């Protein structure tokens, strides 16, 4: 337990109700505001990482060697590569949905959690999925709905996991 640094109020750290002269700034509200700021920064960093990765992967399409597919084994290997690439593409957007929920303040009631945290976070996350996937096309055009399907599903899984995390231990 720490005491007020200037000694004006004699308050200890957990009981932060003291005189206005107290110089301690580790209150719960400031702590959660700082944590939300860190989460917004983490969300921005992850958006940058996704943007660079998607931009680079969009410029190098997966080549389909039709002349090289002469056996079932080569076709299965190509299918595995394609499925793995799409799985990684979807999994990259999990943290985007997760961090978008955690960047909003915590709400206790179910209705407030859904209306003030869940839906705005989902809107922000899906808008970011569209903007990040615009980097794939050469002229930065909006991708079609099929190209957005797997990244959006990955984002939705992350969004759902973060909402369950926010509900507490029973929901996990």
Image (cartoon, rainbow, N blue to C red):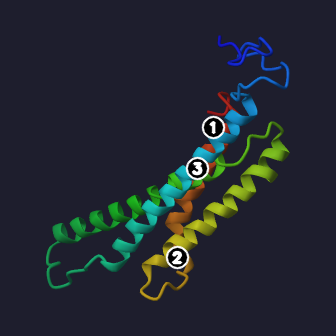
Q: In front of the other: label 3 or label 2? A: 3
Task: Please name the residue that numbered disc 3 is placed on.
Answer: 99
Q: In front of the other: label 3 or label 1? A: 3
Mark 2 / mark 1, whichever is N-terminal: 2
Secondary structure of the residue carrying numbered label 1: helix
Q: CA distance from mark 3 to mark 2?
A: 24 Å
Question: Where does the C terminus fall, quadrant-wise?
Answer: top right
Identify the mark at residue 78; answer none if there is no mark: none
Identify the mark at residue 165; answer none if there is no mark: 1
Q: In front of the other: label 2 or label 1? A: 1
How crowded is the residue under tag 3: few (<14 C-alpha within 10 Å), some, or many (20+)?
many
For the residues bearing labels 3 and 2, Cβ distance under 8 angstroms: no
Q: CA distance from mark 2 to mark 1?
A: 29 Å
Residue lying at 84% horizontally and 26% vertically, measured from the top left: 20
Task: Please name the residue that numbered disc 2 is placed on.
Answer: 146
In this view of the protein, which residue sits in the foreground, 22 or 118?
22
For the residues bearing labels 3 and 1, Cβ distance under 8 angstroms: no
Question: Where does the N terminus fall, quadrant-wise?
Answer: top right
Image coordinates for residue 7, horizontal then vertical, percent:
74, 14
Mark 3 / mark 2, whichever is N-terminal: 3
């Amino acid at each position: 337990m720490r005491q007020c640094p200037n000694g004006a109020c004699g308050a200890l750290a957990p009981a932060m109700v003291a005189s206005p002269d107290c110089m301690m700034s580790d209150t719960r509200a400031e702590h959660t505001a700082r944590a939300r700021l860190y989460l917004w920064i983490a969300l921005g960093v992850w958006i940058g990482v996704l943007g660079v990765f998607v931009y680079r992967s969009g410029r190098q399409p997966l080549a389909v060697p039709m002349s090289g597919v002469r056996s079932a084994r080569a076709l299965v290997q190509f299918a595995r590569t394609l499925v793995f690439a799409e799985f990684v593409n979807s999994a990259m957007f999990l943290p985007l949905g997760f961090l978008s929920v955690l960047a909003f303040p915590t709400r206790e009631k179910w209705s407030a959690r859904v209306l003030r945290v869940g839906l705005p976070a989902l809107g922000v996350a899906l808008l970011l999925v569209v903007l990040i996937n615009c980097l794939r096309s050469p002229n930065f055009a909006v991708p079609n709905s099929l190209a957005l399907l797997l990244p959006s599903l990955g984002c939705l899984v992350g969004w759902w996991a973060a909402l369950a995390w926010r509900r507490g231990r029973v929901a996990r």
